[in-house]
Amino acid sequence: MQHCLFSISYAGLWGQDRLSLADFIRRAADLGYTGVMIAGKRPHLSPLDATPERLGEVQAALAATGLSCPVIAGYTDFSGTGPPMVPVVEMQIAYVEALARMAAALGARYVRVFTGYERDQEPLIHTWERVIASLQESCDRAAACGITLCLQNHHDVGVCSQTMAALLAEIDRPNCRLGFDAWSLALRGEDLYEAARRLAPMTAITTNADYVRLPRARYLPRLENYEALTPDLVRAVPFGDGDIDYDAFFRGLCDGGFDGVATYEMCAPLRGGGRLANLDRAAGQYLAWMRQRGW
C-alpha cells in the first residue's frame, strides 16, 4: 500500500492550525509519508485557483520532497438539491471535470468523489437515478484525462457496502472504483472484515480516521432518572485509540487483494486539540500503526 496524508487535516476547517499547501507537502514528507491526497477546494487547491502557475508551484513542491499525489479529493453531492432552475448537477459534473484536469497535471490517478444525500421531497429511486447518470457522465469526462473516479461511502446514497456495490455495478464504467472506508461501516454496525474482503477487488483507495462513540443521556427530574438518547456522540481520536476495528478492516482488504492507496485524515475536531504538534503526533501514529502491521 502507499501511505498518504490528506491535506484537509491541515486546512484549518475545524479550528485546527492551518498550513499552506506547499508547507503541508513538506510536512507530510518530514513525517515519513510517501504521498499526499490534496483537497480539491480552498484553502488548498480549488479549480478556481488552479492556474498553470499555481499547478507548477504544487508540482515543484512535490518534486522537491519526492512525494507523489495519487489522489485529488472532490467534494460532491449529485442529489441535485436546489431550485429546478439552477443546474446544480451540471455544476457538480463541471467541477469533477476540472478536478480531473488538475489531477492529470499533477500526475494523480484518482479523483475521490461523494455520491449524494437523500432528499425527503422526492422518492429515493429518483435521487438514485440522478446520481447514477451524473457519475456516468463524470466518469466519461474524467476518462478523457486518464483519471479514475473513486466513490467514497460517505453520503447517504450507497453508504452501505451492499448498496455501494450495486451502485458501482449500475454506473458500469471502467474508470469508476471505490474509495472504501471503515468508519461508516463501524458506526452502522457492519462486519468490517467481511465488507472489506468483499469490496476489496472494487477498491482503489481507502481514507482512514478513528473515532470513539460516547453514549448520551438526558436527565429527567420528574423521574430522578436518565433517558438514553441515540445516536451516540462521535469524537475523533488519534489512529488506533478509537472504537473502529481497523485490524479487521485492513485484514479484509488485504485478504480481498487490495494494494492501493491508504490515506490518513483528520477531518473533525481531534482529541488533544488542533495545534500542529498534536496533528503531527496523530499523523505519525497512523504511519507507525500501519508499518507495525506490515500494511
Image (spheres, rainbow, N blue to C red):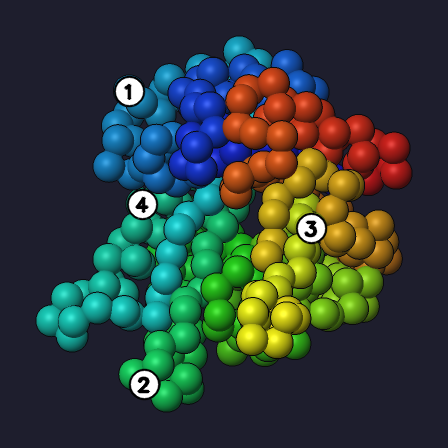
Q: Earlier in the sequence, mark 1 or mark 4?
A: 1
- Label 1 and label 2: CA atoms lie apart by 44 Å
State the residue position of label 2: 122
Q: Are marks 1 and 3 in contact (CB under 8 Å)?
A: no
State the residue position of label 4: 98
Taking 200 as reference, is 205 above or below it?
A: above
Q: Secondary structure at mark 4?
A: helix
- Label 3 and label 4: CA atoms lie apart by 36 Å
- How would you rate the neighbour count of disc 3 (Cα within 10 Å): few for under 14, some for 14-19, many for 20 or more? some
Q: Earlier in the sequence, mark 3 or mark 4?
A: 4
- Label 1 and label 4: CA atoms lie apart by 16 Å
Horizontal and vertical percent position of residue 234: 60, 54
- Label 4 and label 2: CA atoms lie apart by 29 Å
Q: Amino acid at mark 3?
A: Val
Horizontal and vertical percent position of residue 75: 40, 51
Horizontal and vertical percent position of residue 248: 84, 56
Q: Quadrant of the C terminus?
A: top right
Q: Amino acid at mark 1?
A: Glu
State the residue position of label 3: 212
Task: Please state if 23 lies on the left or on the right of 252 as rendered.
Answer: left
- How would you rate the neighbour count of disc 2 (Cα within 10 Å): few for under 14, some for 14-19, many for 20 or more? few
Q: Earlier in the sequence, mark 1 or mark 3?
A: 1
Query: Which dot, 1 or 2, sits closer to the camera?
Result: 2
Q: Amino acid at mark 4?
A: Ala
Query: Which dot, 1 or 3, sits closer to the camera?
Result: 3
Q: Earlier in the sequence, mark 4 or mark 2?
A: 4
Query: Which dot, 4 or 2, sits closer to the camera?
Result: 2
Horizontal and vertical percent position of residue 222: 56, 75
Q: Which mark is residue 53?
A: 1
Q: Secondary structure at mark 1?
A: helix
Q: Amino acid at mark 2?
A: Glu
